[in-house]
Image: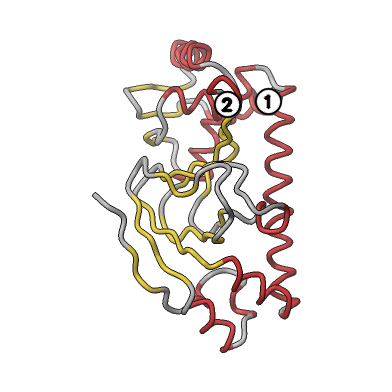
């Protein structure tokens, strides 16, 4: 099914946007649209020109970078209330990563020119965005450090804990990614990810039924994550 768009109403519901003046809010509303996506739809493509800043109203979005020989690393799973494209807002005029929906999602597209004009005039709003950019950069740095220094069981534990605590707030959940994508998220190969996941199952750390994970021992997962 094709994506569809609707106008944006009441941008003050977006975190940080309560610092906008009435005129600034109207300007953004008149230069924005809400776009609906289905699972697997591409939202932005790496190396395309920066045209919009995006805000996730609902759904989950995979942020990933493609390298040589079709190598992919998933940098982040972005959740509702988060922005897409902030890292490219000041640094360059092209997106340096891809974004695709991994669930039915609604994304607010805000014209980058309008966005920048408001940033130049509204210091409180600019400060909020700089904080968001800093947090996103620090998250990616921490993730890359974990990939470099943690052993595979620690990285797989991190993936399971992320979905359990940050996404679903439950010990029982369905993984929204394929095994290959999960491996890319953990910084390993598909075969190594599956083997480690099977070891977790055999050691009674988790139950596994298709995509459904049931964490039996949260303490062991947290220990593996901590010790790396």
Q: Position of residue 194 (x, y in %)?
A: 46, 15
Q: How is the image coloured?
A: secondary structure
- 184 above or below 132? above
Residue that appears at 56% across and 61% down? 53
Q: Where is residue 101 in the image (x, y as percent from the top left)?
A: 41, 45
Q: How crowded is mark 2: few (under 14 residues within 10 Å), some or many (20 or more)?
A: many
Q: In which quarter of the image is residue 218?
A: top right
Secondary structure beneath dot 2 equals helix
Q: In which quarter of the image is residue 216?
A: top left
- 212 above or below 10? above
Q: How crowded is mark 1: few (under 14 residues within 10 Å), some or many (20 or more)?
A: some
Q: What residue is shown with label 2?
A: 186
Q: Position of residue 65 (x, y in %)?
A: 58, 35
Q: Which of 55 and 48 is in front in this view?
A: 48
- Spatial CA distance of label 2 from label 1 is 7 Å
Q: Where is residue 176 in the image (x, y as percent from the top left)?
A: 40, 36
Residue that appears at 43% across and 23% down? 179
Q: What residue is shown with label 1?
A: 147
Q: Is residue 33 left or right of residue 227?
A: left
Count of numbered circles in the view: 2
């Amino acid at each position: 099914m094709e994506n569809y768009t609707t106008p944006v109403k009441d941008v003050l519901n977006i975190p940080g946007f309560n610092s906008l003046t009435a005129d600034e809010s109207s300007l953004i509303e008149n230069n924005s649209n809400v776009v609906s996506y289905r699972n697997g739809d591409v939202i932005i493509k790496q190396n395309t020109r920066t045209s919009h800043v995006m805000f996730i109203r609902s759904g989950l979005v995979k942020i990933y970078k493609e390298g040589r020989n079709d190598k992919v690393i998933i940098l982040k799973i972005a959740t509702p209330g988060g922005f897409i494209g902030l890292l490219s807002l000041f640094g360059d005029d092209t997106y340096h990563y891809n974004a695709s929906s991994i669930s039915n999602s609604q994304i607010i597209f805000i014209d980058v020119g309008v966005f920048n004009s408001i940033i130049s005039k509204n210091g409180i709003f600019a400060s909020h965005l700089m904080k968001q950019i800093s947090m996103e950069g620090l998250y990616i740095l921490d993730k890359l450090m974990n990939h470099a220094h943690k052993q595979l069981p620690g990285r797989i534990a991190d993936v399971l804990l992320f979905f359990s605590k940050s996404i679903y707030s439950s010990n029982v959940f369905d993984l929204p990614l394929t095994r290959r994508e999960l491996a890319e998220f953990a910084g390993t190969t598909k075969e190594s990810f599956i083997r480690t996941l099977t070891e977790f199952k055999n050691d009674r750390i988790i139950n596994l039924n298709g995509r459904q994970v049931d964490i039996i021992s949260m303490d062991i997962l947290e220990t593996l994550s901590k010790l790396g």
